[in-house]
Image: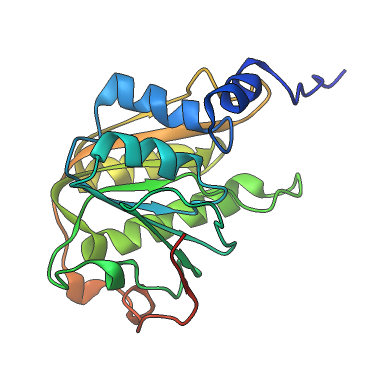
Amino acid sequence: MAQRRILHDEFFKKAKAEGYLARSAYKLKEIQERHRLLRSGMKVVDLGCAPGSWLQVASEIVGPKGLVIGIDLQEVPEDLGPNVRTIVGDIFKTDATALLADPDSKFDVVLSDMAPNTSGHGDDALSVRLCRRVLELLPALLARRGRCAMKVLEGSGYSELLKDCGRHFEKAKGLKPRASRDASREIFIVAEGYKGGDESSVSAAAKPKPAPGWSRP
């Protein structure tokens, strides 16, 4: 018998009590506790940021001297503070660096909690494709020695994806936070020490002109 999904578990209730927009906040919190990806004053981009719980956690950690930019197909209407900006856009089209004060600067951390619209068939392949898009964007987005955490569904493409992350970073490993549901196949690849990349090799779609429809909560 399939395992019954418990919607209102301890993390759902905790998020409600502590003011987070989703239980997923505690996934990033555990990643932070174990790897210390985020620090005060950092510039962070969150790809697939809706509903905004990772933006909240990142904002708390980087503080008023830091900056957190989120991109999602859906608007994040909540006011998440002066150090948070959001963009309504598609990561296959939108330039996340457009909101940085210095056009030549890059982010210290790239986050991605993106997931495909699940159908039960081929979801893991679609998830790996999203992660590979993140890797494509790194030369344009991530500073050398920067850090990354991204969600992927375990499946046939996971091992090769993890190996590829290891080629781009000094170290990369998988982590399944306690806040992930037991029945979920999601795992987070946490990578540190970005080796850098050649921006000239990034496809034209990776650094497009800024798209209309900026949203600043």
State the scheme by which the image is colored: rainbow
Query: Which image quadrant for residue 99?
Result: bottom left
Question: Looking at the image, is 130 positioned above or below residue 109?
Answer: below
Residue nearest the viewer, comparing 41 with 71: 41
Q: In this view, does 35 lie to the left or right of 19?
A: left
Q: Residue at x 50, y 56 (%)?
A: 129
Query: Which image quadrant for residue 70?
Result: bottom left
Query: Which image quadrant for residue 216?
Result: bottom left
Question: Looking at the image, is 210 positioned above or below residue 73?
Answer: below
Residue nearest the viewer, comparing 204 with 33: 33
Residue nearest the viewer, comparing 129 with 209: 209
Q: In this view, does 167 lie to the left or right of 8?
A: left
Residue 7, percent from left and from top: 75, 26
Q: Is residue 31 left or right of residue 40?
A: right
Q: Which residue is drawn at 59% across and 35% down?
A: 22
Q: Residue at x 50, y 50 (%)?
A: 128
Going by the picture, which residue comes out furthest to the right? 1
Residue 165, percent from left and from top: 30, 44
